[in-house]
Amino acid sequence: VLRVLEWSDGAVRFLDQTLLPNTEQYVSASHEREVAEGIRRLAIRGAPLIGIAAAYGTALAAFQQLACDPSLVALRVSDAIALLRSTRPTAVNLFWALERQRRVLVRFELRPPRELADELLSEARRLHTDDAHKCERISANGLDVLPSNVSILTHCNTGSLATGGRGTAFGIISLAHERGSLKHLYIDETRPLLQGARLTAWEASRLGIPCTLIHDSAAPALMREGRIGAVIVGADRIAANGDTANKIGTYGIAIAARHHGIPFYVAAPSSSVDRSLVDGGRITIEQRDEEEVTSIGGVRMAPKGVSAYAPAFDVTPADLITAIVTERGVARAPFGPALRGMCGEADGQE
Ligand code: MRU
């Protein structure tokens, strides 16, 4: 499993995913602003990983402040939480992880600042390790529901680059490969930022997973040709009724899968479930810069003056989802009660 982000010598060290696959460059952030910026520009990305990064970013703020004026550590931490919350709006894991750190702040506010800093770092490490374990359980649970010797289509990137462990949807895929039950992996390129072509194809190649890259609009044709036996994707936020926000394009794949009678699975840690939202209509969808649509790799493709619309995510309604695989088990329709049973207070949600 790749170590794409870690606490190292009092800094947050992370792999800059914007440069992959051509350059493997690590950045050492010594200020929480650099972590926030890394999340904003997708150098650090994927719902679970941005939560983990934000948790370390909070600890980083505490240690930085400790070194100059310990009396202001609690204030700096509170500001860091606000800053990190403002980076990206859709993945609920970010808010979930920062809520965990806010609770640490409340508990340790009146203790010596050093203890607050130490505890924030311990909490970040716990979140990181827990996520790795959750990935293992999601992968094992997912393997149980998959047909054997299956060809899978996935969208975006949900592997080690997006989580604290082997991945969610991609974790299931890599485990299926290890157990000899993956026939083939089809990877959507995932326009506009190419998380499929740049990141998932990179991870799959490193693991020797037999894979083929397709452009996003090819998926329905491959389904019609009988080449795809199941679709597995990740999630950025799952509403209480199972409606799921994930990378733009996911919804279209789910519709195509339903049309062709192909099972469509969502894999995510229970921390991706936002029980405060009754349905997906209330999920905030991040809007990205128009330039991500009008240009490719920094080269302008559309004529000057043409405007573009660039939602980063879409919402797949629960009735198109065959099952939601979490570390706590596999939820099937009706998702409301199934998810309620899986995502309790124990995981830190109100
Ligand atoms: O914009 P990104 O690259 O952060 O989008 C990521 C996704 O949509 C993933 O599918 C999701 O976060 C799950 S990662 C395990």
Image: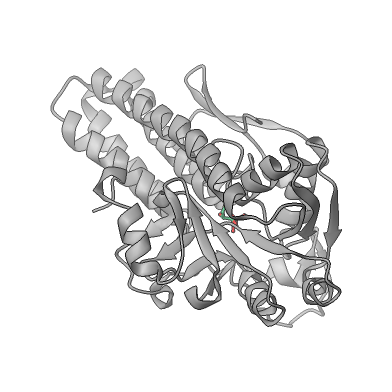
For residue 291, which quarter of the picture? bottom right
Q: Nearer the viewer, residue 182 or 212?
A: 182
Q: Is residue 208 left or right of residue 288?
A: right
For residue 115, which quarter of the picture? top left
Percent of width and height locating residue 53:
48, 38
Counting every numbered tag in the picture gives 0
What residue lies at 41% left-to-right and 47% top-to-bottom? 328
Q: Is residue 116 above or below residue 142?
A: above
Residue 21: tell me if it is visible. no
Residue 296: tell me if it is visible. yes
Q: Nearer the viewer, residue 303 or 101?
A: 101
Q: Nearer the viewer, residue 61 or 138?
A: 138
Outermost residue on the left side: it is: 110
Percent of width and height locating residue 39:
54, 47
For residue 55, which quarter of the picture? top left
What residue lies at 38% left-to-right and 30% top-to-bottom? 59
Q: Is residue 134 left or right of residue 67?
A: right
Q: Is residue 252 above or below residue 286?
A: below
